[in-house]
Image (spheres, grey):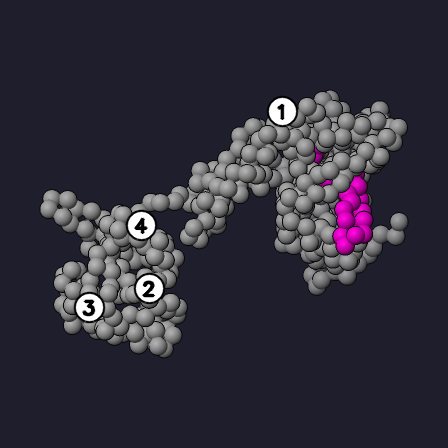
C-alpha cells in the first residue's frame, strides 16, 4: 500500500524499482515475476482515454473496479489506514507540485482518500521492445565493423533493416509509442533505397574521367542523406554533409582529387558552391563533403544549414588534381607519382583528406613495399580552433608512421605551442 517510485519516470527506472521493491506474483502453484498495483482515479481514467482503457479493461480484463479506498485495500491485501495515508501524502505532494519521496514533479490527475470509482491493475516489467540491434545508417543500410584508415563502419551490400531489429535509433531509452513511427519512417527509407540496388549505371558521373570538360555541364539531382555537426570531431563551425548517389551500390566515378559543384534554391535565389568530397571514389551509395557552417562557407552555407534529409540539390563533377591509385603505382596525367606534397589551410584540407585516405589504403595493400614518407602535409590555420580533421591526421600517422607525416603552422598559436608559427602567403 505504499509508493516507491515516480510513476512517470523512464520505463527502465520504474521496471528496476518494481523488481527491487515488490513481491512476486503468486497464484496457487504458479509464481510469476515481481509486480506492483496501479490505481487510476476517474480523472486519470479520462486522461488515459476511454477507447484505449476499454480495450485493456473490458476486452483484456486487466483492470478491476473498486468503489473506494476501502475496496482497493481489500483487493490488494493491505491495511486500509496504510493506503489512506499513501493517498493523503500523494494528494499533498500534488498540491505542492513535488514529492519528497520520489522527486515526482508532474501530477496529471488527483487521487485522494475520498476518490470514488477507482480501477486497479497489476503491472509487471516485461520485454516489449528490444533497444539493441543491427547498426544502420540514415539510409537503412546495415553496417559492419571494419578496420580502416578512416572510419570503422561500412554498409553490407544489399542488406537493409528497419524497426525493432535495429539498434541505436532511440539512443539509451525509447519514448513510448515510437515503435510504429520508427517502422514507418525507416521502413519507407530502407524500401526506397533498396529499390535502387539494381540501378542501371554503376557510376554517378560516367563523364568524370573524360578530359573534354563535358562532365561540368552534366547536372544531376541528388538527395540529402544527413548533416553531421562535426565541431568537436573536425573543427569549429564545420558540418559533414552526405548525399545519396542514385543507386545504393553506385560509386561516384570520379578520380581522387576531383571536386564537385553543388547548387540549390533558397527564397527563389539559386545558390552554388564548390566542394571536394571527403569520401573516396570507391565508396558506394554516398558522396560526402565537409563544409563550413559560418559566413566563411559562402552563400550556400545557409541553404545547407536549413535543409533536412530528403531535400534535393543538383550536383555536377568538375576538374581537379585527378590522381589515380592503380594496382602497382600512383599516376597523375599518365605519369608515375613517387612522392606527394600537400599544402592546406583551415577547412581547405578537405580535398587532402580524400588523398590521405586513398594513400592509406594504398599503403595497406602494399605492406613493406613502399619507400618512407611518400606523403607529406603542411597544414596552416589562423588559430587552434580553425584546425579540422586533426584526429584523422593523427590516426593515419599512428597507423602508417613510416609513410605519412604532417606539420602544423598557426598564425596565432596558444601558449605552449611547439610546432610552426606563421602563415602561408601563396
Q: Which residue bears the numbered disc 3? A: 69
Distance between mark 2 and mark 3 Cα atoms: 15 Å
Q: Which residues are magenta?
A: 257-281
Q: Residues within 10 Å of mark 1 (few under 14, many from 20)?
A: few
Sooner in the amino-acid sequence: mark 1 or mark 2: 2
**Residue placed under numbered mark 1 in the picture:** 198
Is 79 covered by the magenta stretch? no
Give the mark nearest the N terminus, 4 or 2: 2
| C-alpha distance separating marks 4 and 2 | 16 Å
Q: Neighbour class for label 3 at 10 Å: few (<14), some, many (≥20)? A: many
In this rendering, the label closer to the viewer, 1 or 3: 3
Question: Label 2: how many residues lie within 10 Å, few (<14), some (14-19) or many (20+)?
Answer: some
Q: In the structure shown, which secondary structural element does the residue marked by tag 2 occupy?
A: helix
> Could you tell me what secondary structure mostly forms the magenta stretch?
strand
Whichever of callouts 2 and 3 sits on the residue coming sooner in the sequence is 2
Q: Looking at this view, is 270 or 241 the one in front?
A: 270
Left or right placement of residue 191 versus residue 52 in this view: right
Amino acid at each position: 500500500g505504499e509508493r516507491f517510485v515516480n510513476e512517470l519516470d523512464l520505463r527502465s527506472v520504474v521496471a528496476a524499482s518494481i523488481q527491487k521493491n515488490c513481491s512476486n506474483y503468486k497464484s496457487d502453484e504458479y509464481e510469476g515475476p515481481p509486480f506492483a498495483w496501479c490505481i487510476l482515479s476517474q480523472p486519470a481514467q479520462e486522461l488515459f482515454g476511454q477507447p484505449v482503457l476499454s480495450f485493456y479493461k473490458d476486452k483484456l480484463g486487466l483492470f478491476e473496479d473498486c468503489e473506494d479506498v476501502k475496496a482497493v485495500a481489500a483487493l490488494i491485501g493491505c491495511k486500509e489506514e496504510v493506503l489512506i495515508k499513501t493517498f493523503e501524502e500523494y494528494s499533498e505532494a500534488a498540491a505542492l507540485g513535488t514529492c519528497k519521496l520520489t522527486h515526482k514533479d508532474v501530477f496529471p490527475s488527483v487521487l485522494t482518500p475520498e476518490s470514488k470509482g477507482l480501477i486497479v491493475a497489476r503491472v509487471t516489467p516485461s520485454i516489449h521492445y528490444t533497444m539493441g540491434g543491427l547498426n544502420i545508417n540514415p539510409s537503412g543500410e546495415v553496417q559492419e565493423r571494419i578496420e580502416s584508415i578512416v572510419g570503422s563502419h561500412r554498409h553490407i551490400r544489399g542488406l537493409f533493416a528497419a524497426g525493432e531489429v535495429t539498434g541505436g535509433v532511440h539512443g539509451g531509452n525509447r519514448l513510448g509509442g515510437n515503435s510504429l513511427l520508427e517502422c514507418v519512417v525507416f521502413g519507407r527509407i530502407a524500401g526506397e533505397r533498396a529499390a535502387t540496388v539494381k540501378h542501371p549505371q554503376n557510376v554517378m558521373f560516367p563523364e568524370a574521367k573524360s578530359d573534354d570538360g563535358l562532365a561540368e555541364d552534366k547536372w544531376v539531382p541528388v538527395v540529402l542523406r544527413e548533416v553531421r555537426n562535426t565541431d568537436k570531431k573536425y573543427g569549429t563551425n564545420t558540418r559533414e554533409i552526405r548525399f545519396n548517389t542514385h543507386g545504393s551500390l553506385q560509386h561516384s566515378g570520379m578520380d581522387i582529387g576531383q571536386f564537385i559543384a553543388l547548387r540549390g534554391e533558397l527564397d527563389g535565389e539559386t545558390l552554388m558552391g564548390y566542394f571536394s568530397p571527403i569520401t573516396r571514389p570507391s565508396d558506394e551509395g554516398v558522396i560526402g563533403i565537409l563544409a563550413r557552417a559560418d559566413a566563411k562557407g559562402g552563400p550556400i552555407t545557409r541553404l545547407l544549414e536549413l535543409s533536412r534529409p530528403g531535400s534535393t540539390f543538383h550536383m555536377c563533377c568538375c576538374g581537379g588534381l585527378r590522381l589515380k591509385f592503380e594496382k602497382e603505382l600512383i599516376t597523375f596525367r599518365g605519369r608515375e607519382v613517387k612522392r606527394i606534397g600537400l599544402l592546406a589551410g583551415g577547412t581547405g584540407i578537405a580535398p587532402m583528406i580524400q588523398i590521405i585516405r586513398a594513400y592509406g589504403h594504398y599503403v595497406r595493400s602494399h605492406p613493406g613495399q613502399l619507400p618512407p614518407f611518400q606523403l607529406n602535409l603542411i597544414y596552416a590555420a589562423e588559430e587552434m580552433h580553425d584546425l579540422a580533421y586533426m584526429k584523422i591526421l593523427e590516426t593515419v600517422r599512428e597507423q602508417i608512421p613510416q609513410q605519412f607525416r604532417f606539420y602544423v603552422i598557426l598564425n596565432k598559436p596558444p601558449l605552449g605551442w611547439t610546432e610552426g608559427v606563421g602563415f602561408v602567403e601563396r
